[in-house]
Image: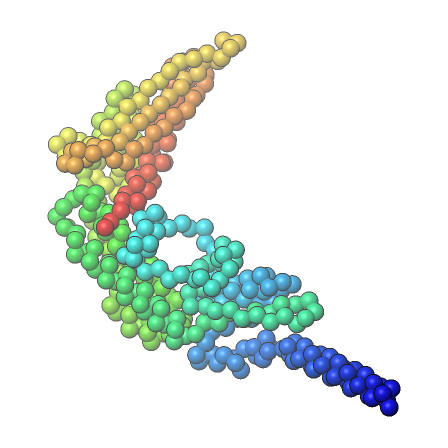
Amino acid sequence: MRKITKYIVNILFWLIVLQSASSLFAAKKTKVVMPEWVNTPSSVYPSSSYMTYVGSGADRQSAELDALKGIASVFGQSIKSDTKSSSRMTQAKENGMVANSSVSTIDQSIMKKVDIDSLIGVEVEFWFDQVSTWYSIAILDRAKATQIYQDMITTNLGTLNSILKRVDETDFSFDSYSLYDFAEDIALENEKHLKKLDIINQDASTSLKSKCVSSKDIRLKKTQLSKNIPIHVIVENDVDGRFEEAFYQAISKAGFRGSYDSNVRYILIAKFSFEESTTSDNTTIRCKYNGESYILDTVEEQQIIPYSVSGRESHMNFNDAKGKAVNKIINKITSQYSQSVEDFLKEVVVE
């Protein structure tokens, strides 16, 4: 009797084990059922309410990258731009003057490859077929994204209008120029957001456009102002006035007005030096040149916009070597200086 009972208990035990294994197997089969969004995303996320893009890859990260590049391409940019924001704009976003929506749900390594501004409001889901392929769907909820962009544009517009109110159009200074320049950057930021919002929700975009200030209008005012900012040039150790003339050309190229009147607020002061040397075999004469300049703000008593050039030219005699050096200096000033002015003024912090 005991043997029979033991036999029955063993049978029941193995039946339970087999049933459990069967349940686990069934559960595992349930997990690998392909989600509808893999082939027909609109059946899960209707296009009237969502924007989606399905990507795939051999691993989770490559599938995510494929999906995010796809949804970013809807906005016209799937690859991360090399364009860098100025430190002024970066600081303005950090302190809240300019709206900045973070994309914290996206892998940091992915954000280095895809345009971050095209991923605002995007969420991601994954599925693995348990064989070799990962699938990912990038989802943008139109209503949520619309609200995010509306808030960002409205915040930026408030800052922009506040900055424009501070501009004194009769104050022909770098301060006024920097205010216009920063306002233009914010307007460009808003126009970038409006282009994306136009794809997400055209009605909302149209409504906001009528309230926004055009970057072109601000640029026109900035240009008109800069033409009325005079800069006088003084050069020590000039060569027949050629360096002075090169600086005046560069000032004009930068959009400002060169002035031969020394009684102005801004004075560009430059100094050049030339040094002779000979090669060890005494066959070639070298001319080493150095030049430094800055603009003196006579009102604030500050030295701004530093600039320097240096190098070395060679020839059979020093005069010819120096002649080559002079030409090189002039070429550098006319091709580089205007950009140095622009870069410096673009970094002026507006608070």
Residue 26 figure quarter: bottom right
The residue at the point 38 percent across, 76 percent down is 143
In the image, is residue 283 above or below residue 36?
above
Residue 145 figure quarter: bottom left
The residue at the point 12 percent across, 48 percent down is 170
Q: Residue lying furthest bottom in this view?
A: 1
Residue 114 can be seen in this image: yes
Q: Position of residue 131 (x, y in %)?
A: 70, 69
Q: In the image shown, does 67 or 323 lie closer to the viewer?
A: 67
Left or right of 197 in this view: 3 = right
Q: Position of residue 119 (x, y in %)?
A: 45, 64
Left or right of 220 in this view: 13 = right
Q: In the image shown, does 238 or 39 lie closer to the viewer?
A: 39
Left or right of 78 in this view: 144 = left
Q: In the image shown, does 191 or 301 lie closer to the viewer?
A: 301
Look at the image and tell me in which quarter the N terminus lies. bottom right
Count of number-bearing discs: 0
Q: Residue lying furthest front in this view?
A: 2
